[in-house]
Image (spheres, coloured by chain):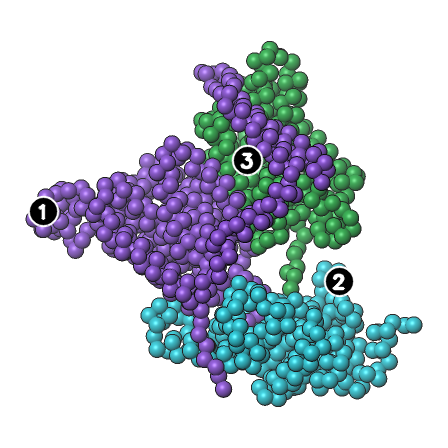
């Protein structure tokens, strides 16, 4: 019973982190699906989302606002707007001019952008981590007395629910709306889609904006969950989310979700049963193994080499 | 020399090549023709080792080679060109030919660093062979240009020269005349015939230019929608009803 | 034309404000437990507005401005000059490199200790960048975990000296070989991966190595690192004030000169210089050998290379191993120069800096990489007040370079090959 409770606790923690990873992973997977590049700066977009949310929350608290749902909503919207604009601008400045060149070129441009954004925030906001107020406190506990108590916090529930809502809205958008259909067409065959009169530039921008908005949501959620942000906040999270995207099969949205959850759980299991220091080793090891044995991921379509 | 038996290639649910057979004798030019999407290039990709065929056998010089890695097949003396020219565009013309002779060179790194006699001799021989073939295809003056800066017809010729410096016994040409003007096609025609006659090379040719095919082929294989349709001499193919139907549609 | 652009220009200007105002204009400050929001200086707000206005103007008159820009190169006097003949250009480059080396040989005797120390660091970066240039510039494999091999070299020397008292000269080949072997072992499974996957996996490897160094406290000392790494000796002569290892003599006593700390610094600098020259020469030689041509062929068109009998794995592995080998070389020198190493020195940012050097210099070009290494290391030192902007400028430079001049400042030149007409 004890062990089971402990295990369930790790499972819950893992799923919490995992679903937030999945939100970030969507951005990688959509961009990769459409233009076949790794948007290295995506982790920084997520970090900027977290910072903006924190700035908005602090600002509203200073103005005397106290109604929690309003604070959260405004923070969320601010973060999404800033991150989306950033995503849009990054694509315009760093990726569009190099689109279609040799594969390494957009990738290096993206790495440059990632370094740039990291230091942009570092210079503006300082390198120290800033505390993120725990706005959603409390939760349920299971188990009693001196034995191990399993807890499911309201924060964790918020993360699950928000992720679920985002995913549902995204799938509906992709499958129902005109733009969503165009997105799918472009990811199938960019050249053909543009011949059919789809404004591919616009669709690519939309992809970046959506990915960035979801990353901003994750930024707010994980910022509150971890309780602090710093300019390096996005780097590791970005890598993890990319791992999740590859794990699930890059280009596939359900894959990103699945990959995120698997990664989150495996990480939380490693840190609780092995050692917290090695959780990154395990996730990178997992990435390497997956790429070696199933390069297209769990839900990805197999690729045929074009000759 | 080369025998392909019942070759099949399946991609997921699509049977791209179904039971195709063909054989090539010494010093023979064999063409594969068929409508677009018939699976001609897929046959080439299986033969050259880029795809692992899902069924059938490929026997080259008495060895079964189906499923072997591409680079090993090419080392046996079976080399190919590509439908869309694939040159090393940022390397110079002559460097393209040197890369192709990799296995004839002394690739021992220590030997290269010290510059042993054997290394220098082999390097010189490779240069001479490159010069010979560049002269042969009329590109000697352009030897130090970037390959990517050549005109299209020149790129096609360079690709063939790049195959020839490997001293192959079987050359596979994938639509070598595509994009060439009539004069260039005529030159190509003579080049291919001379490869066969002067250099003892057998040629497998995929081509849409019927006058070229009919002119130089010893035998022709027709495939349609992945299946073998007919085979025979140019004369027989010209009069084959199935072939005419496949090309003109059933009108 | 201008009218059509107005809407777009306004949009771009608004986006500029959105992405700069909250981050730049509102600063979070931690005061104890509480966080407060403070405004930035007025100049920051002015700067944001100026930036937005610039974006607006640029986007409005985009077409005519781009037209002007396109004409601009014609005003440049050099652009009309006939490019130099290839063989002459190559010769000129060798002369420039020789000149730099001769200058570098005598220079340390006339400058301060700090400058020599910095120059040693530049030389280490040159070695690293030349090695990475093989992997990224020539073979076209994006290795984002290059620093791992640097770490292997450095830690090999540190551990060997700590546990087995092995000297610098013994450790130099061992460190390089071990780094090369690590490269081979890591490379073997991952080199089948497509380019961008390879980048992520190598990044992962780099992080794994760093985490291991950080946590394997019993061996590596964890975050505290390893100290007391010995200096190199010259034929058994030590450069310290007192001889540490029995059987050695000290440099200043042997030559009967007064002890000076500078001797050691200059000696290390000269070692680094010699090793950097050797690295450059060996790699230069490789580039003209079959293996070097195979690297480039694989970078240009993997499928064509395979169809001509090149084994993808063997060729990539050779590039990866050789790159790692020289990183190990540099790592050993670094450990000896610092006397102390810790995982701090081997973070991803270091990999990114080396990559930036290769990219800025011009992928594949040796002279370009050498000049870029000098610029990237020395410029931030010269303009100390800008040093905190160093990484910001790096990032921006990488992006701009890819957009405007992906071939780098000094693109690689092909060697001219003379052919004899055959009969």
Q: Which mark is residue C257?
A: 1
Instruction: Please tell me which residue is depicted at 33% across the width and 47% down the height of the picture.
Output: C122
Q: Nearer the viewer, mark 1 or mark 3?
A: 1
Q: So how many labels did they put on this image?
A: 3
- Judged from this view, the residue extending furthest toward the left is C256
Residue A112 appears at what percent x and percent y?
Answer: 51, 42
CA separation in Å, label 1 and label 3: 56 Å
Q: Residues within 10 Å of mark 3 (few under 14, many from 20)?
A: many
Instruction: Please tell me which residue is depicted at 80% across the width and 83% down the height of the picture.
Output: B237
User: Which chain does the residue under circle 3 lie in?
Assistant: A
Residue tagged by mark 2?
Answer: B14
Q: In terms of image quadrants, where is residue A145?
A: top right
Q: Nearer the viewer, mark 2 or mark 3?
A: 3
Chain B rendered in what hue? cyan
Report helix, strand or loop for mark 2: strand
Residue C48 appears at what percent x and percent y?
Answer: 55, 27
Between A69 and B155, the residue placed more toward the observer is B155
Residue tagged by mark 3?
Answer: A44
CA separation in Å, label 2 and label 3: 43 Å
| Above-or-below relation of C292 to C421 | above
Instruction: Please tell me which residue is depicted at 73% across the width and 33% down the height of the picture.
Output: A169
Report helix, strand or loop for mark 3: helix
The chain that appears green in the image is A
Q: Residues within 10 Å of mark 2 (few under 14, many from 20)?
A: few
Residues at circles 2 and 3 in contact by the CB criterion of under 8 Å: no
Q: Nearer the viewer, mark 1 or mark 2?
A: 1
The chain that appears purple in the image is C
User: Which chain does the residue under circle 1 lie in?
Assistant: C
Residue B37 appears at what percent x and percent y?
Answer: 76, 67
């Amino acid at each position: 019973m004890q062990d089971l409770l402990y295990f369930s606790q790790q499972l819950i923690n893992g799923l919490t982190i995992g679903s937030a990873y999945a939100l970030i992973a969507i951005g990688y997977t959509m961009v990769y699906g459409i233009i076949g590049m790794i948007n290295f700066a995506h982790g920084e977009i997520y970090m900027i989302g977290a910072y903006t949310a924190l700035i908005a929350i602090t600002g509203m608290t200073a103005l005397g606002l106290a109604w929690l749902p309003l604070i959260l909503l405004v923070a969320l919207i601010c973060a999404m707007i800033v991150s989306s604009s950033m995503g849009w601008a990054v694509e315009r400045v760093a990726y569009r001019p190099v689109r279609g060149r040799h594969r390494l070129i957009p990738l290096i441009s993206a790495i440059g952008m990632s370094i740039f954004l990291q230091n942009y925030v570092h210079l503006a906001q300082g390198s120290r981590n800033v505390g993120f107020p725990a706005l959603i406190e409390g939760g349920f506990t299971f188990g009693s007395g001196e034995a191990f108590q399993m807890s499911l916090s309201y924060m964790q529930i918020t993360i699950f629910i928000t992720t679920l809502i985002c995913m549902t809205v995204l799938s509906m958008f992709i499958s129902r709306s005109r733009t969503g259909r165009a997105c799918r067409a472009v990811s199938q065959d960019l050249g053909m889609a543009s011949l059919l009169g789809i404004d591919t530039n616009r669709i690519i921008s939309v992809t970046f904006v959506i990915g960035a908005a979801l990353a901003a949501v994750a930024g707010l959620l994980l910022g509150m969950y971890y309780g602090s942000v710093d300019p390096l906040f996005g780097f590791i999270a970005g890598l993890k989310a990319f791992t999740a995207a590859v794990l699930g099969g890059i280009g596939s949205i359900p894959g990103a979700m699945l990959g995120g959850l698997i990664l989150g759980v495996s990480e939380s299991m490693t840190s609780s049963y092995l050692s917290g220091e090695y959780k990154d080793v395990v996730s990178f090891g997992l990435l390497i193994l997956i790429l070696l044995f199933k390069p297209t991921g769990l839900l990805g379509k197999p690729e045929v080499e074009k000759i | 020399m080369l025998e392909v038996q019942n070759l099949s290639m399946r991609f997921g649910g699509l049977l791209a090549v179904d039971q195709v057979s063909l054989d090539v004798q010494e010093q023979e030019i064999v063409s594969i023709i068929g409508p677009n999407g018939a699976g001609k290039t897929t046959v080439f990709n299986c033969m050259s080792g880029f795809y692992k065929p899902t069924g059938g056998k490929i026997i080259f010089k008495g060895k079964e080679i189906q499923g072997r890695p591409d680079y090993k097949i090419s080392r046996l003396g079976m080399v190919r060109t590509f439908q869309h020219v694939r040159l090393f565009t940022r390397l110079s013309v002559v460097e393209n030919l040197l890369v192709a002779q990799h296995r004839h060179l002394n690739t021992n790194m220590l030997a290269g660093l010290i510059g042993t006699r054997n290394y220098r001799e082999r390097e010189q021989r490779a240069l001479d062979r490159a010069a010979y073939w560049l002269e042969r295809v009329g590109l000697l003056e352009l030897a130090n240009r970037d390959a990517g800066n050549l005109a299209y017809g020149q790129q096609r010729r360079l690709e063939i020269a790049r195959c020839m410096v490997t001293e192959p016994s079987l050359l596979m040409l994938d639509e070598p005349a595509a994009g060439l003007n009539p004069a260039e096609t005529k030159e190509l025609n003579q080049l291919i015939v001379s490869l066969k006659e002067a250099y003892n090379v057998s040629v497998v040719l995929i081509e849409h230019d019927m006058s070229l095919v009919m002119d130089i082929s010893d035998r022709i294989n027709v495939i349609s929608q992945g299946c073998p349709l007919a085979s025979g001499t140019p004369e027989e193919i010209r009069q084959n009803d199935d072939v005419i139907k496949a090309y003109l549609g059933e009108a | 034309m201008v009218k059509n652009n107005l809407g777009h220009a306004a949009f771009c200007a608004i986006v500029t404000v959105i992405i700069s105002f909250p981050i730049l204009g509102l600063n979070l400050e931690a005061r104890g437990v509480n966080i407060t929001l403070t405004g930035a200086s007025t100049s920051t707000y002015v700067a944001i507005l100026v930036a937005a206005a610039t974006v607006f103007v640029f986007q409005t008159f985009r077409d005519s401005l781009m037209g002007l820009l396109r004409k601009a190169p014609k005003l440049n006097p050099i652009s009309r000059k006939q490019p130099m003949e290839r063989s002459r250009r190559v010769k000129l480059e060798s002369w420039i490199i020789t000149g730099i080396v001769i200058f570098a040989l005598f220079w340390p005797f006339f400058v301060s200790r700090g400058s020599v120390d910095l120059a040693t660091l530049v030389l280490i970066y040159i070695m690293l960048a030349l090695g990475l240039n093989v992997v990224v510039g020539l073979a076209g494999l994006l290795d984002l975990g290059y620093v791992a091999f640097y770490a292997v070299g450095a830690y090999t020397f540190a551990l060997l000296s700590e546990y087995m008292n092995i000297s610098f000269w013994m450790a130099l080949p061992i460190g390089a070989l071990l780094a090369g072997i690590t490269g081979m072992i890591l490379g073997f499974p991952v080199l089948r991966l497509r380019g961008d996957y390879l980048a992520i996996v190598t990044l992962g490897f780099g992080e794994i190595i760093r985490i291991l160094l950080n946590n394997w406290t019993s061996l590596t000392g964890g975050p505290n690192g390893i100290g007391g790494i010995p200096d190199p000796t010259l034929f058994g002569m030590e450069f310290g004030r007192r001889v540490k290892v029995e059987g050695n003599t000290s440099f200043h006593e042997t030559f009967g000169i007064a002890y000076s700390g500078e001797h050691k610094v200059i000696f290390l600098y000269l070692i680094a210089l010699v090793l950097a020259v050797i690295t450059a020469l060996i790699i230069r030689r490789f580039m003209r050998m079959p293996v070097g041509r195979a690297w480039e062929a694989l970078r240009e068109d993997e499928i064509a290379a395979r169809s001509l009998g090149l084994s993808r794995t063997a060729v990539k592995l050779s590039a990866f191993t050789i790159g790692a080998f020289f990183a190990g070389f540099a790592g050993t020198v670094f450990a000896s120069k610092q006397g102390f190493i810790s995982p701090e020195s081997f973070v991803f940012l270091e990999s990114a800096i080396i990559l930036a050097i290769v990219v800025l210099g011009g992928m594949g070009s040796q002279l370009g990489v050498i000049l870029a290494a000098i610029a990237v290391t020395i410029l931030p030192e010269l303009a100390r007040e800008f040093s905190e902007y160093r990484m910001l400028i790096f990032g921006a430079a990488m992006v701009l370079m890819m957009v405007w001049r992906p071939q780098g400042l000094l693109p690689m030149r092909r060697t001219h090959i003379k052919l004899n007409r055959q009969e």
